[in-house]
Amino acid sequence: DSGAIYNSGFLEMVYGLETIDYTQLPANFDSYSQRDRLRIVRRMVTVMDAHTNGQDLETGRPLPVPEIALEDALVRISAAQ
């Protein structure tokens, strides 16, 4: 029954989204390219700011991602821990 497998995987994926800690860098963060590290931390800051401002993250609309330097974003993420 592929429907049961799909539903199980979907529910596990949704559960995982609720438990992501956006104040923690991904494992092996230093192994990512400079460009990818910048994209990751900018997205992390975006989600943290949206949460702080009480924005609904379930609307499906993309959130604006700030043009913030890697070092500045890392400081903000570290301060939120």
Image (cartoon, grey):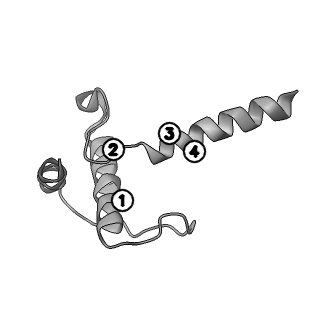
Q: CA distance from mark 3 to mark 1?
A: 15 Å
SS for tag 2? loop
Q: Residue furthest right?
A: 1
Tell me: 12 left or right of 8.
left
Query: Residue 56's mark?
Result: none
Q: Is residue 54 above or below residue 72?
A: below
From the image, state whether disc 1 or disc 2 is nearer to you.
2
Residue at 31 percent of width and 48 percent of height? 22
* Number of on-image labels: 4
| 4 and 3 marks in contact (CB < 8 Å) | yes
Query: Marks 1 and 2: CB-CB under 8 Å?
Result: no
Which residue is painted at 57% across and 44% down in the image?
14
Q: Position of residue 64 (x, y in %)?
A: 39, 70
Of the image marks 2 and 4, the number of the one nearer the N terminus: 4
Which amino acid type is shown beneath numbered disc 4? Val
Task: Look at discs 4 and 1 and give the one toward the viewer.
Answer: 4
Disc 2 crowd, CA 10 A, few/some/many (<14, 14-19, 20+)? few
Residue 21 placement (x, y as % from top left): 33, 44
How far apart marks 2 and 4 lie (CA) works out to 14 Å
Which sits earlier in the primary sequence, circle 4 or circle 1? 4
Q: Amino acid at mark 1?
A: Val
Q: Earlier in the sequence, mark 1 or mark 2?
A: 2
Decide which of 15, 70 is in the foreground and name it. Answer: 15
Q: How far apart are the alpha carbons under marks 4 and 1? A: 16 Å
Q: Badge 1: few (under 14), some or many (20 or more) residues near its Cα, within 10 Å? A: some
According to the picture, the residue beneath numbered tag 1 turns out to be 47
Residue 16, numbered label: 3
Q: Is the C-beta separation of discs 4 and 1 under 8 Å?
A: no
Secondary element under disc 4, as helix, strand or loop, is helix
| Label 1 – label 2 distance at C-alpha | 10 Å
Mark 4 = which residue? 14
